[in-house]
Image (spheres, rainbow, N blue to C red):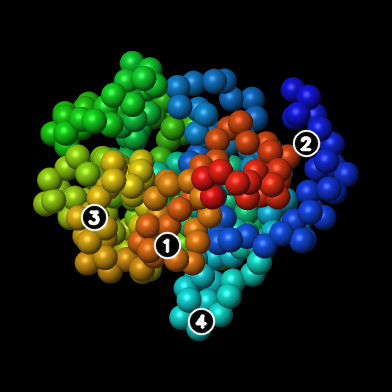
């Protein structure tokens, strides 16, 4: 509580912004969001993955004022031209494909002129059903989701599809038309995240190939644009995906891949296994500022 009050005061006094002007990141700070909740949303299983709308708006303001937001195309151009990125490069990403990215995140992204990448699992979007982990969490609790991450692909396929409760259900996926709207907004890139969000390393190679290639193909058909980036579902290296998965992502023509390994995406990382920082509901603007300015650089941190 006291630490939070101190950080809030430091943010309000402009300390973090001043500090960040003298900080150079060791790589890109890739932020991994999922959905964006209403400020008055009630707690629910897995709601810790959904940042509150006002917190996200405050994150956007901080990133615009104190960091160097980039798009994935900016990153590609820097690599192609052999030039460095800005000293405090930050890339915003969203996983899964929740409707709240359009309704609650996009206005703040537009207000502050921030680019972002949205990694979409196509099955829930096409079928208008909850993501399997949200459906399972609502039925049996978050612990059941962790246990299910060890299931086989056949066991995931046996899960009964479940529709969102309403249009404003925090677990509702985008529709295809909504995805098209997002894809047409300046600065928004659409990336692939498989079809069903299954843990790829638990699936046979043929199933992995289908998840990767057909998911990409569906997104390109819906949006009319190229899909060049991929985020591994769940994303833990060696556990949720492996070398064979990376090879399939490469053969499908992706030029960037993103894991959930914690840390800055450093220049010496493989392009198909970029690190990211997971953004949880507990990360306020002052906490994000502190991490960008101090914690993520500390000796022994996962950066």
Of residues 21 and 153, the one nearer the viewer is: 21
**Left of 95 or right of it: where is 33?**
right
* Residue at (68, 38) in percent of width and height: 287
Q: Tell us which disc is closer to us: 4 or 1.
A: 1
Secondary structure of the residue carrying numbered label 4: loop
Residue at the farthest front position: 299
> From mark 4 to mark 1, how far is it between C-alphas?
16 Å
Residue picked out by circle 1: 269
Look at the numbered discs 1 and 3 and tell me whether their residues touch, using CB distance below 8 Å: no
Residue picked out by circle 4: 82
**Sequence order check, earlier mark of 2 and 3:** 2
Residue picked out by circle 2: 7
Residue 99 visible? The answer is no
| Residue 238 % position (x, y) | 29, 46
- In the picture, the disc for residue 243 is 3
Look at the numbered discs 2 and 1 and tell me whether their residues touch, using CB distance below 8 Å: no
Instruction: Name above or below for residue 294 compared with residue 137.
Output: below
> From mark 2 to mark 1, how far is it between C-alphas?
32 Å
> From mark 4 to mark 3, how far is it between C-alphas?
27 Å
* Residue at (73, 40) in percent of width and height: 286
**Sequence order check, earlier mark of 4 and 3:** 4
């Amino acid at each position: 509580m006291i630490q939070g009050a101190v950080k809030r005061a430091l943010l309000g006094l402009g300390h973090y912004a001043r500090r960040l002007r003298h900080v150079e990141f060791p790589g890109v700070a890739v932020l991994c969001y999922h959905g964006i909740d209403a400020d008055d949303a009630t707690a629910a299983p897995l709601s810790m993955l959904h940042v509150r709308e006002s917190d996200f708006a405050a994150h956007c303001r901080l990133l615009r004022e104190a960091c160097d937001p980039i798009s994935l195309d900016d990153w590609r151009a820097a690599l192609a031209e052999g030039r460095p990125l800005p000293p405090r490069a930050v890339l915003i990403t969203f996983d899964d494909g929740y409707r709240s990215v359009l309704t609650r995140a996009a206005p703040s992204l537009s207000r502050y002129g921030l680019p972002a990448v949205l990694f979409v699992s196509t099955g829930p979007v096409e079928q208008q059903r909850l993501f399997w982990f949200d459906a399972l969490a609502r039925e049996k609790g978050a612990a059941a989701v962790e246990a299910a991450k060890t299931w086989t692909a056949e066991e995931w396929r046996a899960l009964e599809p479940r529709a969102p409760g309403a249009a404003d259900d925090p677990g509702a996926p985008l529709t295809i038309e909504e995805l098209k709207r997002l894809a047409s907004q300046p600065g928004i890139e659409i990336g692939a995240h498989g079809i069903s969000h299954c843990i790829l390393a638990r699936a046979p190679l043929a199933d992995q190939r289908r998840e990767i290639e057909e998911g990409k193909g569906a997104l390109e058909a819906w949006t009319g644009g190229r899909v060049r980036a991929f985020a591994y579902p769940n994303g833990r290296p060696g556990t949720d995906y492996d070398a064979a998965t990376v090879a399939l992502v490469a053969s499908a023509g992706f030029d960037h891949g993103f894991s959930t390994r914690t840390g800055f995406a450093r220049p010496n990382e493989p392009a198909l296994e970029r690190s990211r920082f997971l953004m949880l509901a507990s990360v306020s603007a002052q906490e994000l500022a502190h991490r960008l300015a101090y914690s993520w650089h500390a000796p022994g941190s996962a950066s």
